[in-house]
Amino acid sequence: MTSLKPPPTASEGSAPAAALHGGIRDPRTLILRNLRQSGIYIAFVVIVALFAFLTDGVLLSPGNITNIVLQYSYILVLAIGMVILIIAGHIDLSVGSVVALTGAVSAVLVIQQGYPWWIGVAAALAVGVAVGAWHGFWVAYVGMPAFIVTLAGMLLFRGLTLRVLDNVSLSPFPAEYQKVATGFLNGLLGGHGYDAFTLFIAAFAIIGYAVSVFRTRLARIRYQQSVESFPLFVARVLLVAAVVMYFAWQLAHARGLPIVLIILAALVIVYGLMTQNTVFGRQIYAIGGNLSAATLSGVKVRKVNFWIFVNMGLLAGIAGVIYSSRSNGAQPAAGNMFELDAIAAAFIGGAAVAGGVGTVVGAMVGGLIMAVMSNGMQLEGVDQSTQYVVKGLVLLLAVAFDIYNKRRAGATR
Amino acid sequence: MDADVLLQMRGITKRFPGVTAIEDVSLAVRRGEIHAICGENGAGKSTLMKVLSGVYPAGSYDGEIVFDGRAVHFGGIRDSEAVGIVIIHQELALVPYLSIAENIFLGNERRGRAGFIDWNRTNADAAGLLASVGLDENPVSPVIQLGVGKQQLVEIAKALSKEVRLLILDEPTAALNDIDSAHLLDLLRRLRDQGITCIMISHKLNEITAIADSTTVLRDGRTVETIDMRSGDVTQERIIRGMVGRDLDSFYPSRESAPGEEVLRIEDWTVWHPVQPRKVVDGASLNVRAGEVVGIAGLMGAGRTELAMSVFGRAYGRDISGRLYKHGKPIKARTVAEAIDNGIAYATEDRKRYGLNLIADVRANVSAAALDKLSRAGWVNGNEEIKVAEQSRQDLNIKTQSVMDPVGTLSGGNQQKVVLSKWLLTDPDVLILDEPTRGIDVGAKYEIYTIINRLVAEGKAVIVISSELPELLGMCDRIYTLSAGRITGELPVELATQENLMALMTKEKELAG
């Protein structure tokens, strides 16, 4: 496909192999080199361990793990869309209002008008997409900064929420609708004091993961790229398997597999793959890294910008459904400050303020750090004021650490 | 110690984790001379100047610095400025929306009573400084209204305001056209005659031979030699020999010229400025054939880049009119993507701003314009991508440890090779190379020329835009001259000389009727 001469055969294999293999086999250097990436995971483990210790293990009890997932699911859904926008160099301040609006539209249709639950869900998603298209139009085609457009959207859609709800709360939703956020898949395979189905799904997921990473490994070997040593590879897979199984075991001893967790897992997988492995995803990074260079490389910048805002709207709609389902109704003040939690999750998860850097998985870990801290502090009975202070400081320190690391990486050159 | 020597740096060694940037470098600058420092990119010139100006504080390097007879230990840039050492960086550091006067006295404000800024004194002093650098501008006009050449003069005025004794200029003419460069060099001579000692880092050897009293050559972080230039018979070849450690047969690799069929023809191309009501390109027509290198010569502002970018998917300008023919058939290139699909590639003159995603790795930059070819149904084949990036690294000799390293950590010449790799991967028929060797060292230039020759040997059509006439004369088969947006001439290279090209490039008045 290139017009270039084939490389001299003598250097084939040896030179690139040496270049690519250079020093990243040893796990210690691997961790040190990628402190920026791995730092967030280490921090997560430390925070979980700290609160598990402080709460005498209550944090990791089956019921509480289920709770954390249910309580923060909508923030994590928002964080997926948010980190994508942040990578492209934008932001969305309106998502809290959009969560409220989509939930409100759904509530009016289902509770007031008596439509079936799925009409409410469909309408919420449609409204979310429409809001996203609205923002996308102003940002991508008119060329306004997303900060301003979505700040206006934050007011605009909060106002529409009040209008739709006529300033009153609506409740309750029918049971089917409530199941979205509070339902569980369990009992399908029976079990003795635990849910065999949950464990089956987890085992299935682990096998899928193992097969997938093994195939990636084979492909990399075929392309003569560096791979970690086989024992290290096995250790990594076993570690993931152990964590997932432990998590599933705890869930199985509580109420089974939350439906919301299935939705969330599906979204993380889809968006994780989309951002890393598709042309569209790669163009998002290119735009955030250098807008002019992306334009001059043939990236259809407007189109990409438009669609990532539409996507944010869709995810806000999903979050709106989950939140309204969980709170069993729609309130005029719903979703207040959700945008800040979603933005914080993205930045704690390693996204760069200037754009071009960040991952969906990082944002999820960032969101979980906030979730575990909130939950842990609630269990400890720490008052609300302290919780805000601690969360604020964590955001500040996470980004400071990131900048420190970047500077250190720059200084070695 | 020789009283004639203003600055003496001895045995300077600066190490970074894992790499020694400069080792045992010595430099002696005589009072009142222009001392050039040259060397390939990565030779350690910038590191040496950062040590000298205190960017790397005393203690972070080995060796000693003696300035005006006293050993000095700078803890930061303020310390070095306090004794009169001022550095002007390649990337100008002016605030675009502040006035010329405000920029000159930024951080060094002319204060009146109660600490308020004395605007009368500020502007009057600024006017005096502007006169001394020969810049006829109102000190209250914002810097953004000035061209790069004038901004450079403002930087020098700013340095003079600090009572400079040793002025360090890093690539001062890299972004200037020939006229502005000549003006700047004249100014440096005048400053020298007023007793200001000057260190100039430059890749432009013709300027060094024209102006420098001494030249210190660095190679691979070590001092190679200091050449006394005052005898006047030191040639560019002599300096190059020191820089690369060998004789270059020629700046320009030779090539058999065998142009084939016409590949791209541009007819009656007119482009309006995006915001101002004026034509930037006016009825330009030109063509390029397979296996041919066509040059576009023009002064800065002649519309060279604007012509190229507007052809490349209308990436510049508005109300673009004119026709494009590829292999004789009319084509449309209304977007960059369409231009790429039509086999046109444009490598920008400003790789950092328009060419590269500096925070991304080499791989992602190389594949950026050709992801469609590396993907199926929207899914990128990551392994294939790394393979082609690796292939480019070998083919173009991109010096990087791995294709997963960020492009921002590469030297200028290697960054330029990444830009070229990106466009070669789109498999273009026509390559428009805008200043392909700007700001890169002699060795890398030679490599770029070799790549260009390889491409035309494969039957590609290449258009080279360059401010350096010797480069065009050395590389091209045909040269068009552009002046004020119009094509003012077309010469086969056998008939072209710097003199007749320059005459055509400045021939705007009689044509603009």
Image: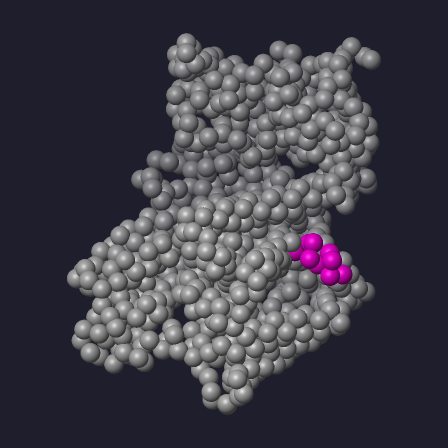
Q: Say if the magenta span includes residue B258.
A: no
Which residue is depicted at the point 75% across and 14% down? Answer: B70
Which residue is depicted at the point 71% across and 74% down? Answer: A234
Q: Quadrant of residue A330?
A: bottom left
**Tally of numbered tags:** 0
Q: Which residues are magenta?
A: A26-34
**Which of the pair B150/B125 is nearer the observer?**
B125
Q: Position of residue A279 (x, y in %)?
A: 50, 66
Which residue is depicted at the point 37% across and 36% down? Answer: B512
**Is residue B343 in view?**
no
Magenta stretch: helix, strand or loop mostly: helix
Location of the N terminus of chain B by quadrant is: top right
**Is residue A170 in view?**
yes
Q: Position of residue B180 (x, y in %)?
A: 53, 28
Location of the C terminus of chain B by quadrant is: top left
Q: Position of residue A93 (x, y in %)?
A: 36, 53
Q: Position of residue B509 (x, y in %)?
A: 40, 32
Q: Is residue A90 above or below residue A130?
A: above
Q: Say if the magenta span includes residue A31.
A: yes
Query: Is A81 positioned to the left or the right of A157 in the image?
Result: right
**Which of the pair A371/A236 is nearer the observer?**
A371
Q: Quadrant of residue A243?
A: bottom right
